[in-house]
Image: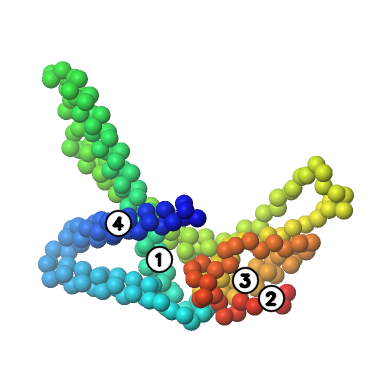
């Protein structure tokens, strides 16, 4: 529990600088592709308005149960902002690690340059502007990987259900349990992105396996317990 609280505090501390960093990157990208100042200001204001709208929608306290079907609000407001939050935070962590490694490397190179004789050509090659520029661009590209990875998980991987068969071997297993079959369903996360129809489909898949025991292991919901899905009731299967 303490570890989870520490991770939460760390995420909150890193969130604000991560947003400032990516806003600055988007600003630089806008200045590169849009020469007109009025166009850049219009796009910047539009982007900030969308950001505020998404943030307000996400953190506005709602007591109504979360629907177990896809809604326009979930698809157009909640999903994009949560994707942005997680991706921007992870990307910023990557950038921060690159920055720390860069500062450490520069310190080591500074010491190394001091040890080299002034006439040694390696002094200039170690910290050449071209090399520094390449490393900086590489860090930015790698830090953008979480955006693609999170989009892949949101749009595709969440529906790619995999059925695996794992044999369990116990030395002192009673003979009555030989061939005993256990089916496990995990991480259901019932809500707009894991609808009631999806759950029913997966229950039917489990029933086709004809297990002797079915184990349901969390998480059943994703965010707040008081917003659990309306249909959450004893299953007729």
User: Relative to residue 40, is residue 130 depicted above or below?
Assistant: above
For discs 3 and 4, the disc positioned in front in the rendered view: 4
Helix, strand or loop under label 1? helix
Judge the density around disc 2: few (<14), some (14-19), many (≥20) Cα neighbours within 10 Å: few
The residue pinned by badge 4 equals 18
Residue sitting at the far right: 175
Helix, strand or loop under label 4? helix
Q: CA distance from mark 1 to mark 4?
A: 14 Å
The residue pinned by badge 2 equals 235
Q: Nearer the viewer, residue 162 or 7?
A: 7
x 22%, y 39%: residue: 132
Helix, strand or loop under label 3? helix
Determine if residue 22 is in view.
no
Colouring rule applied to residues: rainbow
Judge the density around disc 3: few (<14), some (14-19), many (≥20) Cα neighbours within 10 Å: some
The residue pinned by badge 3 equals 199
Image coords of residue 167 (percent x, y): 74, 48
Q: CA distance from mark 2 to mark 1?
A: 30 Å
Q: Nearer the viewer, residue 60 or 167?
A: 60
Determine if residue 155 is in view.
yes
- Residue 148 location, quadrant: bottom left
Q: CA distance from mark 2 to mark 3?
A: 10 Å
- Residue 138 location, quadrant: top left
């Amino acid at each position: 529990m303490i570890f989870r609280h520490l991770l939460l505090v760390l995420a909150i501390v890193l969130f604000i600088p991560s947003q400032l960093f990516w806003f600055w990157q988007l600003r630089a990208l806008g200045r590169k592709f849009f020469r007109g100042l009025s166009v850049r200001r219009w796009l910047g204001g539009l982007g900030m308005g969308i950001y505020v709208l998404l943030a307000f929608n996400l953190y506005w306290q709602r007591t109504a149960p979360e629907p177990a079907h896809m809604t326009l609000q979930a698809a157009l407001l909640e999903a994009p902002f949560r994707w942005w939050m997680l991706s921007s935070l992870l990307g910023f962590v990557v950038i921060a690690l690159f920055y720390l490694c860069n500062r450490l490397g520069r310190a080591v190179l500074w010491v190394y340059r001091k040890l080299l004789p002034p006439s040694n050509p390696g002094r200039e090659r170690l910290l050449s502007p071209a090399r520094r520029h390449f490393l900086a661009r590489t860090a930015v590209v790698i830090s953008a990987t979480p955006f693609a990875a999170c989009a892949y998980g949101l749009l595709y991987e969440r529906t790619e259900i995999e059925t695996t068969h794992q044999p369990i071997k116990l030395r002192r297993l009673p003979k009555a349990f030989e061939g005993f079959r256990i089916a496990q369903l995990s991480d259901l996360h019932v809500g707009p992105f894991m609808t009631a129809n999806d759950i029913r489909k997966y229950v039917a898949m489990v029933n086709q396996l004809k297990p002797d025991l079915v184990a349901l292991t969390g998480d059943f919901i994703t965010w707040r317990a008081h917003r659990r899905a309306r249909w959450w009731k004893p299953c007729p299967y």
